[in-house]
Image (tube, rainbow, N blue to C red):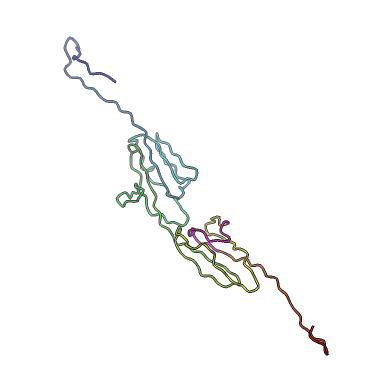
Amino acid sequence: QSQIPLTFPVVDGKPVQTIIYTAKWKALTSTININAGGGTIDSGYNPQIDGATVSFNKDKTTAKLGGVTDLAIPTAAQALPSISRPGYAFDAWYTTPDFQPASKVNSIDAKFPVGEKTYYAHWIAEKSYIYFTTGNGSSIDTMEGYTGDPIADTKLPVSVREGYTNTEWNVVNSWNIDMSAYKNVLPDTFPAGTTTYVANWKANPATITFDYQVPGTANK
């Protein structure tokens, strides 16, 4: 750090009466976070910004752009990424985690911010259905809700088929979500898309009894 002299310097035998000190600044590290809110960032997202870096977390649910304060972001790189999330419809991007209307945005700012700034994706839950295919058993009503809604009673409904026992349910989901843990119980929340429970019936033991009578004798 330079010190201001106590006396004016002399140039060509004359004192200099005006001294100008010019500050030199170094831009500090700046970060732009993109939070897909449980969604997945499209694999093609790779904004080209000279002097900046782009990184993702393991599941590509978040991205981080690293630069310095006021680093220019080209127009083509200001576009926010395409994202997807099973069972949800994308609504909009916001710069506040509580999705304040005034913070709704369509793109990244033209320059890196001072410090850090985060863009948050907001989603709207879509309809979710749980069907029961009971074969020749008694029918069970379809369950209907929205993705992520809680299911108050996770006990599976009962289908009855004379002479058969339902040993377990086979479960398939339209989004290929692994439902193997729910063969004998409903999930805690409505899964994305359509989930179908298919009854697996096992025949009960059966006995055939013949009642006959020989003429002139009692029944055998």
Residue that appears at 51% across and 59% down:
187
Q: Quadrant of the C terminus?
A: bottom right
**Residue situated in front as seen by the camera: 219 or 140:** 219
Expressed as whole percent of the image width and height from the top left, the position of residue 21 reads 23, 22
Q: Is residue 25 above or below residue 115?
A: above
Q: Nearer the viewer, residue 180 or 160?
A: 160
In the displayed structure, would residue 155 be above or below residue 83? below
Whether residue 5 is situated above or below residue 47 in the rendered picture: above
Camera-side residue of 180 and 188: 188
Q: Quadrant of residue 199?
A: bottom right
Image quarter hosting the N terminus:
top left
Q: In the displayed orientation, state which residue is furthest to the top.
A: 13
In the rendered structure, the answer to whether residue 12 lies left or right of residue 164 reads left
The residue sitting at the bottom extreme is 216
Q: Say which residue appears at 55% left-offset and 72% top-offset.
A: 139
The extreme front residue here reads: 218
Image position of 111 (left or right of 155) = left
- State yes or no: residue 190 in magenta: yes
Looking at the image, which is closer to me, 19 or 130?
Answer: 130
Q: Residue at x 50, y 68 (%)?
A: 142
Count all numbered tags in the image, as a single digit. 0
User: Could you say where residue 213 lies in the image, as x and y percent from the top left?
Assistant: 80, 86
Q: Position of residue 34 (x, y in %)?
A: 40, 44
Q: Tell me residue 3's x, y (percent).
A: 25, 18
Q: Which residues are magenta?
A: 180-196
Q: Is residue 138 magenta?
A: no
